Image (spheres, helix red, strand yellow):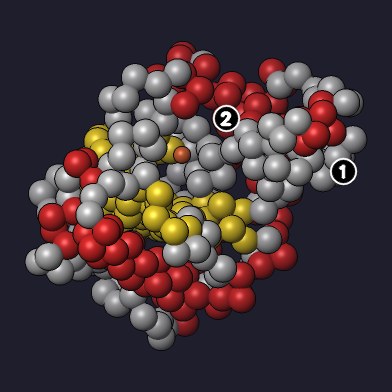
Amino acid sequence: MTRIVSLDITRWQPPYDEATQQRAIEALESGDVLVLPHLAFQLSPQETRFLSPAWSDAHAKNISLERGTLKGARGKPADLDALSHMIERFAHGAGELVAGLFPRYAPYVKRARTSFRPQPAVGRGLSWRKDDSRLHIDAFPSRPNHGERILRVFCNVNPRQDRVWRVGDQFAPMAQTFLPRIRSQRRWSPRLLAMLHVTKGKRSEYDHLMLGLHDQAKADLAYQSGCPQQTVHFAPGSTWLCFSDQVMHAAVSGQHMLEQTIHLPIAALYDPDSSPLAVLQRLCGRPLLSAH
Ligand SMILES: [Fe+2]
């Protein structure tokens, strides 16, 4: 089962000692969830007003900041500026933390999307495929990533309420369960989907299988209730990290979270053999990155 590894880090800024780095690297790359129970993201007294779903524009699931542009939020320009600053400060802290704990990742910490989630974690009545209260690995239908890793840093900024997850089985046994159920990708499909702009670039066999694992796991209710799993509480003021393309996770409850996504090439990993790409290639017995 997915393990929860706790580290006593209290600063977003490096340096971190070598033993701490080593524990963090081993845990993260072997598919554990790394919890930093004493690393809070401090909101200023003026920023606590953002802990309300009223700032969401009702269309998007989350408020997001990408390359300085705020999306999914509504409010007066001055308020939205202050909200952007809060999210930007978290993005900076998360970047420093990752570069400090995992020096090999530092050159790749290009900031992707940062999100602020003032809505309750569950209860939006979505289709089963979009229902993140079911255990899943992250895989995105429109954005093939060809094995690139999805590292996510989360922080519970709710002053009172835990963020609660379920975490499930480790990646390899989960993949062994579902790989046989995934239909092979049609030869013409990657090119067609890219041409129609359904996907951004061509979907590799790796991307096809990752989507298949995501869908098959979510669709199987017996697996959802019967697979190895545990419930994890992330207390107010705690931070946690994981490779969300590797860790089976599901939202149970909570509200008000900040999240930073960092995309990492396989070459940045300390142990590329632990990546989902390597695991799937071993299980399938062939390379999975050549698009047909
Ligand atoms: Fe997810």
Residue 214's mark? 2
The answer to whether residue 177 is visible is no
Q: Earlier in the sequence, mark 2 or mark 1?
A: 2
Q: Is residue 3 above or below residue 178?
A: below
Give me the residue at 47% from left, 26% from top: 130
Label at residue 5? none
Which residue corresponds to the image point at 70% horizontal and 59% vertical from the top-left?
Answer: 266
Amino acid type, callout 2:
His
- In this rendered view, identify the residue nearer to me: 200 or 229: 200
Q: Residue at x 22, y 59 (%)?
A: 79
Q: Is residue 252 above or below residue 233?
A: above
For label 2, being within 8 Å of ligand 1 is answered no
Residue at left 88%, top 26%? 188
Residue density around tag 1, few if under 14, some if 14–19, many if 20 or more, within 10 Å: few
Give the amino acid type for the residue marked by disc 1 in the picture: Ser
Which element carries disc 2, helix, strand or loop? helix
Residue 112: % across, % down? 52, 59
Asked whether residue 182 appears in the rendered view, the answer is yes
As measured in the structure, the alpha-carbon distance from the residue carrying label 2 to the one carrying label 1 is: 21 Å
Residue 290 is tagged as 1
Q: Measured from the top left, where is residue 51 in percent x and y? A: 17, 50
